[in-house]
Amino acid sequence: MSAMYVENVPDDLYDQIEQLALARGVSVGEQTVQLLRCAVNHKRRAEPTEVLDLLERLRRDAIIPSAKMPDSVELLREDRQR
């Protein structure tokens, strides 16, 4: 595994990371790696507009039906009549 040394970490930021680490029962280093991992993965997530564009394409291509879903109460009534 690689090592990383960070200089000039503001005291308040270090204190926050230290408190998170204490709460989870891990070292400051482990907590820092977890925070870095979350930050990197967050950037990889799709932007909301990308998700909306994808949904619109799926609807347009009829992969997701645009018709209103039937009422669950009506479906239950129909099923009971069988």
Image (cartoon, grey):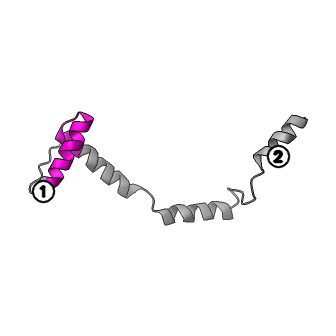
**Bounds of the magenta segment:** 12-32
Q: Mark 1 falls on what kind of element?
A: loop
Residue 78 sits in quarter: top right
Q: Is residue 1 visible?
A: no
Residue occupied by mark 1: 10
The quadrant of the image that shows the N terminus is top left
Image quadrant holding the C terminus, namely top right
Q: Is residue 57 visible?
A: yes
Q: Secondary structure at mark 2?
A: helix
User: Which residue is farthest left?
Assistant: 7
Q: Residue at x 12, y 56 (%)?
A: 10
Q: Is residue 56 above or below residue 6?
A: below
Q: Quadrant of residue 19?
A: top left
Residue identifier under label 2: 74
Mark 1 vs 2: CB contact within 8 A: no
Gap in Å between the C-alphas at discs 1 and 2? 61 Å
Question: Which secondary structure dominates the residues rendered in magenta?
Answer: helix
Callout 2: few (<14), some (14-19), or many (20+) C-alpha neighbours within 10 Å? few
Amino acid type at circle 2 is Glu
User: Is residue 35 left or right of 73 when viewed as pictured?
Assistant: left
Splitting the image into 4 quarters, where does residue 80 fall? top right
